[in-house]
Image (cartoon, rainbow, N blue to C red):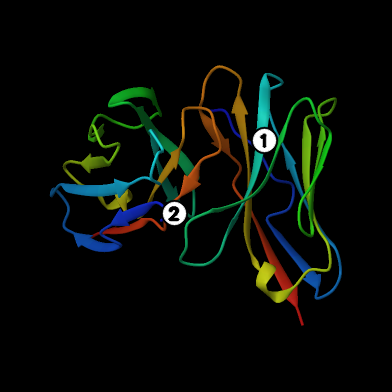
Amino acid sequence: KAGVTQTPRYLIKTRGQQVTLSCSPISGHRSVSWYQQTPGQGLQFLFEYFSETQRNKGNFPGRFSGRQFSNSRSEMNVSTLELGDSALYLCASSPRTGNTIYFGEGSWLTVV
Amino acid sequence: GESVGLHLPTLSVQEGDNSIINCAYSNSASDYFIWYKQESGKGPQFIIDIRSNMDKRQGQRVTVLLNKTVKHLSLQIAATQPGDSAVYFCAEIISGTYKYIFGTGTRLKVLA
């Protein structure tokens, strides 16, 4: 089985812009969650989707949003980018909520 | 906020020795725990998990121990190899929340 696939792997954006990151889960996995990883804060939970519904949400501002499609693929969007949004954004999938999650390689976002 | 802590941010171990990475979790309602390994530039990789109805689980060269009395989790790596060099995260899942809480990570350095 192919693993979790995230695109793009690397990107550079300017402050004030917006960005969309994409995640394709492992085949058959219906739960997709997103995490932000920075050296100072570690892995921070953003949100989790199951069957196109957001089931859980972390403590991030409304500039961070996401969605899940009927094929379980997911996107996250960050609007009005700030320098502090520079981070590795990780997507993870699992067969259903609460199971072991498997991570993709992440999307490295640099905001300049 | 809630967090899962690690006692040692960096652990240096001689090649061939055993490594022990510790983790203190905060919520007694957590019923599922996972260890992940993250190599530089990659996403976290699942190593081993344990449910709260167990106190020990063994994998290939790895053993996870769970002490619910003191809310402590450890990962033991036998005969540590250079390829084991990475950052190791523990995660707890609180029953009913489906939300993963990750520790800040411990960097394991294997010395030749």
User: Could you say which quadrant of the image residue A109 lies in?
Assistant: bottom left
Q: Is residue A46 left or right of residue B9?
A: left
Q: State the residue at coordinates (55%, 17%).
A: B96
Residue A34, image x, y percentages: 38, 40
Residue B89, image x, y percentages: 62, 49
Give above or below for B32 relative to B95. Answer: below
Q: Are marks 1 and 2 in contact (CB under 8 Å)?
A: no
Give above or below for A81 relative to A72. Answer: below
- Residue type pointed to by label 2: Lys
Give above or below for B53 relative to A8. Answer: above
Give above or below for B13 relative to A105. Answer: below
Nearest the eye: B57 or B112: B57
Q: Is residue A108 left or right of residue B55?
A: left
Assign a secondary structure to mark 2: loop
Question: Pointer 1: residues within 10 angstroms few (<14), some, or many (20+)?
Answer: many
Residue B87, image x, y percentages: 61, 59
Q: Chain of mark 1?
A: B
Assign a secondary structure to mark 1: strand
- Residue type pointed to by label 1: Phe
Identify the residue under disc 1: B33
Q: State the residue at coordinates (53%, 54%).
A: B44
Q: Look at the image and tell me in which quarter the C terminus of chain A lies.
A: bottom left
Disc 1 and disc 2 on one polypeptide chain:
no
Q: State the residue at coordinates (17%, 41%).
A: A79
Q: Is residue A42 left or right of residue B104?
A: left
User: Could you say which quadrant of the image residue A69 lies in?
Assistant: top left
How far apart are the alpha carbons under marks 1 and 2? Answer: 24 Å
Q: Chain of mark 2?
A: A
Q: Look at the image and tell me in which quarter the N terminus of chain A lies.
A: bottom left
Identify the residue under disc 2: A1
